[in-house]
Image (spheres, rainbow, N blue to C red):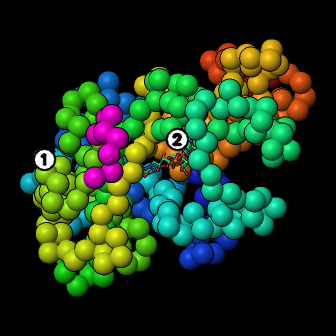
Amino acid sequence: MTSYRNFEHLQDIFASNESIKHGVKMTMSNFFFDKKMEDTIEAGHLAKFQETLTRKELKGVRRDTAIISEHAINQQANVVDAYQLIAPAIDTDKYMFFLYDVVTSKGGILETRKITGDLLNQEQELLDEYDASAIINATGVNAHETAGDESVYPLRGALVRVVNDGKRFPKVTDALAVTHDDTYGTPEDMVFIVPRNDNILILGGLVQPKEWELDLTLESPEIVRMRERCNNFVPGLENAEYDPDAPLVQGLRPFRGSNVRVERELRQRADGKTSTIVHSYGQGGSGFSLSYGCAGDVLDLVQEIEDGVAPMKMSVIMKAKAEAQAQLAVPVA
Ligand SMILES: Cc1cc2nc3c(=O)[nH]c(=O)nc-3n(C[C@H](O)[C@H](O)[C@H](O)COP(=O)(O)OP(=O)(O)OC[C@H]3O[C@@H](n4cnc5c(N)ncnc54)[C@H](O)[C@@H]3O)c2cc1C
């Protein structure tokens, strides 16, 4: 499950010249750090940056402290290191409609219905009802119920949306991020300022583990603090006007402490048959980034079911894939 598969796909969508329809835009994305990346090795920023240098599909990769002065960010914001690259930014309102059209144009039928309890206990009834050969479980944080997986929990997040027309503050055209740092930071150290489309800018971010309620408002203390972090990072944002359609959006990122789960159901059914459920959940704050990679893996697993192959643990599959990849990397003399 790789985000590069997704990157290439989104790049193709952008190149199709229909980004207005899809909401996908290639955007210069800048990452700022309050320490040299070499001094925070455990946080993984340097490794991530070094990986970007090895991927020829990534354009505009550059590490340079000059990036700090090239942007209208607070030069006293204690930023000492930065890199940038061109990455897809998605207007998810448009993109979800686009995906809806893709599914329905291929004959998919969407039905809204709540399923209560563990899927394994009702698998055969559901297969019979829909005349299906497999069930894909992509229920996000609710997988704790539908897959009986107690390791899944929410990371509540929220974004403020403001008008980005250049009237109340200089228009922001690049994505600007100070990444959340598990190792050194507090959960409230993240700054995420991204043009959603030509007119709306989103301001974040917030990561609140195990908060289930979507009851945040613009006046909630953590939202006020989030705004203040953004205002401090890009002076002028304090004058921004809220997006009248949706000034605040919030959601539950489905997180699994260990890993994303893209795996067949390993538990045996009560009738002794092998389950035909394929799980894909726990993508946390990267559900869009990982979507095509995970979907490709799901497709492989469904194929396995159709071929009558027994289910394997995800760790075993990943080890086998890594070994196959290592073999491919051996130069042939
Ligand atoms: C503030 C915020 C910012 C984010 N930023 C990014 C970002 O920059 N990049 C990125 O890649 N990702 C981002 N994400 C994360 C991304 O939104 C999630 O990873 C993604 O939504 C997870 O998708 P999902 O389909 O697995 O789960 P969900 O979006 O939660 O969808 C699960 C679906 O299953 C349905 N469902 C659940 N239980 C049942 C049931 N029992 N019966 C029937 N249906 C059920 C739900 O109704 C829902 O439609 C962000 C999330 C938040 C909240």
Residue range corresponding to the magenta coloring: 208-215
Relative to 285, 59 lies left or right: right
Q: Quadrant of the N terminus?
A: top right
- The circle on residue 127 is none
* Label 1: how many Cα within 10 Å (few below 14, some 14–19, many 20+): few
- The circle on residue 140 is 2
Q: Kindly identify which residue carries mark 1.
A: 78
Quarter occupied by residue 28: bottom left
| Marks 1/2: CA–CA distance | 37 Å
**Prevailing secondary structure class for the magenta stretch in the rendered image:** loop
- Which residue sits at x=41%, y=77%? 198
231 in relation to 84, above or below:
below
- Which residue sits at x=37%, y=30%? 44
- Which residue sits at x=39%, y=57%? 29
Q: Disc 1 on helix, strand or loop?
A: loop
Relative to 202, 25 lies left or right: right
Quarter occupied by residue 9: bottom right
The question of residue 210 being in magenta is answered with: yes
Q: Is residue 116 visible?
A: yes
- Which residue sits at x=62%, y=18%? 315
